[in-house]
Amino acid sequence: MRIRVRGWIAGQVITSPFPSSKTIAGHDCVIRNFHWWTRLNYTGTMIRRRKFRLRLPSRTLVLGERTLIMGVVNVTPDSFSDGGQCLDTQDAVERALRMEAEGADIVDIGGESTRPGSAHVSMEEELARVMPVLEALRGKLRIPISIDTRKAGVARAAARAGAEIVNDVSALQFDAELGEVVRRARVPIVLMHMRGGPATMQKGPFARNVIRDVSAGLRAAAARARRAGIARSQVVLDPGIGFGKNYHQNFKLLACLPRLATLGYPLLMGTSRKAFLGTALGSAASPAPPEERIWGTAATVASAILGGAHIVRVHDVKEMVQVARVADLIASEA
């Protein structure tokens, strides 16, 4: 009798005679009482998260002890889930403060929608949307603010107004000056994988091997950050769920997230209310609306945490705080 055990380690299949073999050379795996253990931090498809420290101007964030919740505040008229709800400055401020009260660890504020098919917004318009919110939150919000932008000018102004993280969906490909702004501000940056641009990314062609494509893209993004002088310890990677991936590829990324964890950077996952969940909970022809995707989001958040995500970016903070708390307890037993 032989046992075949497939793991994420180097993508290999380990085969061993049973029950006579006690060890498998080179893989540090042991058979004891019909169970498998590994000293490489893997248990089934779960991964024990590596700990990281992000240095912000006001504090240090420890990643990996528990999952951090990043709440989304879109100061836009056309975001896919909540466009128009926070276009008014006071509404956006109240949303951010409510998210803090519900348990968010970070608030991510953006003034440009990057949903599929969205149009480019000028720097002046983006600044007009986000700066009043940032200024109104100064001294009121106790948790750090992330600025969701691809533009150096917006990031520079936001950092001066108190933003302590830059979340760049273009991974330093849209604005060549953004890396220098991040370096000078000494703030962390989130680099997201996107195949194409917001206007065209869901029109294809899609990658034949999404894990290989995302891995290569994120390695290239991290290399761009290093060339810009950004410290490796200040980089967070985001696989970019829904950004240039087809329906099945989004689930593949969630299932194979432990493989992306081997890149050696903290991971952020943003699945909240996205279109692939609408299709899964309804159909391609009649997707469930964003407000009915909360529990589908909860399933993906739990999966992401068990797969090694350090930060989850969500619209529904109160609910996902509970999901993360339980998922963290499960992960702690890995």
Image: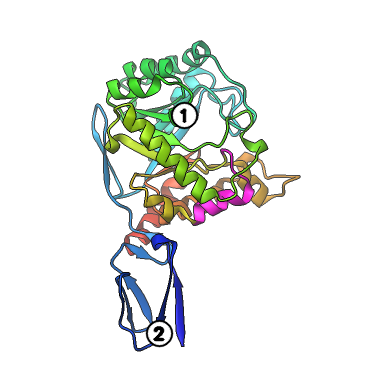
- In the image, taking residue 324 as reference, residue 247 lies left or right, namely right
Q: Which mark is residue 64?
A: none
Is residue 250 one of those drawn in magenta? yes
Residue 49 shows in this picture: yes
Q: Secondary structure at mark 1?
A: helix
Q: Residue at x 66, y 41 (%)?
A: 289
The secondary structure that most of the magenta stretch takes on is helix
- In the image, taking residue 294 as reference, residue 265 lies left or right, namely left
Q: Secondary structure at mark 2?
A: strand
Instruction: Identify the image quadrant of residue 132.
Output: top left
Where in the figure is residue 221, as x and y percent of width and height? 41, 35
Q: CA distance from mark 1 to mark 2?
A: 58 Å
Q: Residue at x 65, y 29 (%)?
A: 117
Q: Residues within 10 Å of mark 2 (few under 14, many from 20)?
A: few
Near-viewer residue (222 or 107): 222
Q: Residues within 10 Å of mark 1 (few under 14, many from 20)?
A: some
Near-viewer residue (298 or 236): 236
- In the image, taking residue 83 as reference, residue 56 lies left or right, namely left
Q: Residue at x 32, y 60 (%)?
A: 332
